[in-house]
Amino acid sequence: MEQRKPWLKQYPKEIPHSLDYGNKSLQSYLKDVTKEYPNKKAIHFLGKELTYAELYESSLKFANYLKKIGLEKGDRVAIMLPNCPQGVIAYYGTLFAGGVVVQTNPLYMEREIEYQMNDSGSKIIITLDILYPRVSKVKAQTCLEHIIVTGIKDFLPFPKNMIYPFIQKKQYGIVVKVEHQGENHLLTEILKSSEAKEIELDINPEEDIALLQYTGGTTGFPKGVMLTHRNLVANTLMCTTWMYNCKRGEESVLGILPFFHVYGMTTVMNLSIMQAYKMVLLPKFDATDTLKTIQKFKPTLFPGAPTIYIALLNHPDIKKYDLSSVQACISGSAPLPVEVQEQFEEVTGGKVVEGYGLSEASPVTHSNFLWGKRVSGSIGLPWPDTDAKIIDMQTGEEAEVKQIGEVIIRGPQVMKGYWNRPEETEATLKDGWLLTGDLGYMDEDGYFYIVDRKKDMIIAGGYNIYPREIEEVLYEHDKVQEVVVAGIPDPYRGETVKAYVVAKEGKTITEAELDEYARKHLAAYKVPRKYEFRKELPKTAVGKILRRALVDEEKDKIKQA
């Protein structure tokens, strides 16, 4: 077995090759940690703090209220909230009631909300007061029976809670008042009136779904990934094992990655609860607020995405802040440029490593070691109990060492399938293996490298070109802040390489300058033929640059020409 898994030889003695996942539901970890650390702070949110005992009690109250309004085991509950205590309460409360969580992006507009509610069959949604008008407009066209409403002010300390409505009115131009009656419910009333009793549940962790995680949907309609209790427990336990120097009950985690994204949910929320860490939550990413928060509250762990680290590194006042509390960062959601990794380690003194995963795997499958050998440009090694291999795209056989093919993965974190999509499940899960759609290779030591998405590979003049390689080169230019490379239609070459570039603040950069730089570092056929300079690039909520959105823009331009 070790011959086919050369990565196991790289593991330090602290990381076991296999773990015992027990037979527990995800929510049982909140109950356990509350018994062990009842008075420990679980959440810090804009000045307000909740202990584990308070979080557990509120989650049970929420669960009992869901049962009161008719929730049955397996019913779906949509959570449409930014990072805030209410999001954690609703998530664990739904699980305590036997429901299935449906994470819903608070940025969704009516059409997207309607689609997700109907596709998931959600009966109940919890959302913010300022988002209530959006949800109520589509309620009649969905299966929704109840809307639970909360506001940011509900979990702010005095006097912030009194001032916040005025700030909200100035920011959004609206003040929404919802009455606690009929199909509308206020979380503040629920937490006052509901009882905090435990609910007897018969959970089969391997079979019962805990979460429907909708994939990005940048092409076609988003699909609901069915993640079981076992999937989520396994991935979180793998994470704790990988971060073996972190001390149970002692770390604090900066929660910027949104919980409605599976990466933030696992590496911030579920990890914190499993290990009795304190979550320092921010409802949205703002570079200045983040730097102030790190200096003041001294988080030790900072899971993030490259665009978050880039924004902080390019903040004009970064040198004025003390970021030395940050000990460990696992970067996900997009490739981590080596330049960014080195600079962020320099300013924090902590370790920043690249990891890899996808919603269908709860999400993490690979990472470099935080403490030990790491390989720049590699996504690292498979996590414990995670098998991975590269498949030759022509033959379907396992590829040779360093041969590029499709990355496929098997392990206890791999999804049950796509919600109500048996054909797509069958196309993605083959004999227990998850086909990722990513192209990569493995070296002789078992380190994996992603060269690109299968669908993002550019074929220009017969050459296979991988955007990531070009992006890595352009990121090293001292005037480039962000860059994404895409293949755009070309009548002669089939596709041609185009780079979309955001210059660093106060810097001017020209096409000729970048062209000259690229030609020094890349083969001629890989050098971008076109450049477009932008103030910003389109991104997902977790900061992943939307390459496909730029390609679609180009196609629309051609149609209109």
Image: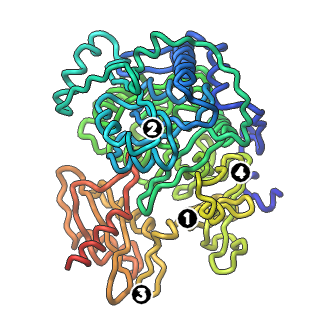
Residue 192 vs residue 94: left or right? left
Give the foreground label among 3 and 2. 2
Q: Relative to 487, say whether 102 is above or below.
A: above
Q: Are marks 3 and 1 in contact (CB under 8 Å)?
A: no
Residue 192 vs residue 161: left or right? right
Residue at 45% across, 16% down? 190
Question: Does label 1 or label 4 sit earlier along the sequence?
Answer: 4
Identify the residue position indicated by label 1 in the image: 438
**SS at circle 4:** loop
Tell me how far mark 3 sits from mark 1, CA to CA.
Answer: 22 Å
Question: Does label 3 or label 1 sit earlier along the sequence?
Answer: 1
Tell me how far mark 4 sits from mark 2, CA to CA.
Answer: 35 Å
Tell me how far mark 3 sits from mark 2, CA to CA.
Answer: 52 Å
- The kind of residue tagged 3 is Gly
Identify the residue position indicated by label 2 in the image: 144
Q: Relative to 206, say whether 274 is above or below.
A: above
| Residue 461 badge | 3
- The kind of residue tagged 2 is Leu
Q: Residues within 10 Å of mark 2 (few under 14, many from 20)?
A: many
Can you see residue 61?
A: yes
Identify the residue position indicated by label 4 in the image: 411
Residue at 32% across, 72% down? 498
Nearer to me, 49 or 175? 175
